Image (tube, rainbow, N blue to C red):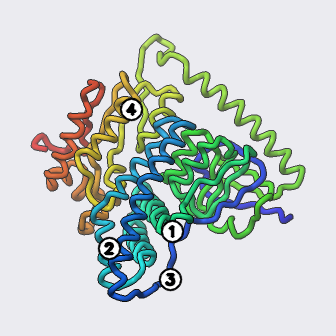
Amino acid sequence: MTFIRLRGNGVSPGIGMGELSLTEPALLPARKEPIAKSAVDGELRRLKKAVERTKVELLELKQQVKDNMGEEHAFIFDAHRLILEDKSLFDGIRSTVRDDKVRVEWALSQANQKYRELFDAIADDYFRQRKSDVSDVLARVSANLEPKARLRAAKGTGKKYVLVAHEMLPSEAALRFSGGNVLAVATDMGGPTSHTAILARSLNIPAVVGLHNITQQVKNGDFVIVDGTDGEVIVNPPPAVRKEFLGKKERYDRYFRELKKTARLKSVTLDDVKFFPLANIELPEEVEMAFSFGAEGIGLFRSEFIYLQSASLPTEEDHLAAYSRIARAAYPAPVYIRTIDIGGEKTLPQLKIEKEPNPALGLRAIRFSLRHRDLFKVQLRAILRASSLRNVRILIPMITEVEE
């Protein structure tokens, strides 16, 4: 067994070690298969049935994760349902089948490639990582074209393991983690704002991403150490290295226990002044984690993620579902929802936004919202509707003038 040390990006602190379980990627077929004009309607029926099967499957998987980890971690399946109902995305897939006279598998693959390229062109890492959500849904639909080949979560054996993958699709990460057997995660792809990274942090599972080719260097059964604090992965370590990291793990676990004790202390300074620590979050799933570390409210919810759950612009109901979930989870603590901060490095795939010479000071934040008032009104109405619990606040970014 070969001893290997690899460097990546530590996205969830802590140290996990154990036997490795290698996950095969859920790939979309890349082979173009022409069909006769008379077969087009049959292909479109296949697509319709696959979408219906996927809707049922997402409900089943959501319930499974909800039962095992709680409702806040099952939110990803609601987001994927919105993608599945996206008219623009699936109209494009149907058009490819009709116009190019190809099988649905190829049309799904082409749509996946198109949206991955769109997201890859975005400079902001958080926005860029949302490409995996579209890939996740399209891979599930592709698998459901043949009912016997449906994408399911791997059934656990009860044995704990270190999960290694090329790229973890968001729903797969939620399902794997819900089994309670994942000791740590290491992936070739991904970044600190991917769903896998955010979910790993919320569950205190050590994770290192961006390892490029770990999947090509390991095999099932290898012993692996994942150091999510320093971003290092060690495969088949010799006894001395294993002993070193066991000691490091014990020190980190002790530190973490003390940290959790501190989180329960009252938020009062030594001279008896009360203060209110509030958390900044990007996803509804992060509310529970924030409060477990001592937050007394949500000081900033970055609402941009809602625009990235679908190939179309979100509806008022889409906004409302996310805001209401956060408000309920945090109640009675305050929740400050920041209106969309698009511009600069952050762009929307749904809108054609021209590049500017100085984007950081250009059409962004409140200036973007006032330019696109229809979008702004949809968001404001949803925030107002979500405020029925009376703990919701509105934060408007980058106000520079009284007129704004």
Q: Amino acid at mark 4?
A: Ile
> Which badge, 3 or 2, is on the more N-terminal residue?
3
- Of badges 4 and 2, the one in the foreground is 2
- Of badges 1 and 2, the one in the foreground is 1
The residue that label 1 is drawn on is 146
Q: Quadrant of residue 356?
A: bottom left
- Of badges 4 and 3, the one in the foreground is 3
> Which badge, 4 or 2, is on the more N-terminal residue?
2
Residue 395 in percent (x, y) is at 26, 37
Q: Are marks 1 and 2 in contact (CB under 8 Å)?
A: no
Q: CA distance from mark 3 to mark 2?
A: 17 Å
Residue drawn at x 68%, y 31% is 255
Per the rendering, the mark at residue 54 is none
Q: Quadrant of residue 42?
A: bottom left
Disc 4 crowd rating (10 Å Cα; few below 14, some 14-19, many 20+) is many
The residue that label 2 is drawn on is 94
Disc 3 crowd rating (10 Å Cα; few below 14, some 14-19, many 20+) is few
Per the rendering, the mark at residue 298 is 4
Residue 100 in percent (x, y) is at 34, 85
Q: Amino acid at mark 3?
A: Arg
**Element class at badge 2:** helix
Q: Amino acid at mark 2?
A: Arg
Quadrant containing the C terminus in the rendered view: top left
Q: Where 283 falls versus 262 (above or below)? A: below
Residue 32 in percent (x, y) is at 46, 84
Q: CA distance from mark 1 to mark 2?
A: 18 Å
Q: Where 330 falls versus 60 (above or below)? A: above
The residue that label 3 is drawn on is 31
Q: Is residue 249 left or right of residue 151?
A: right
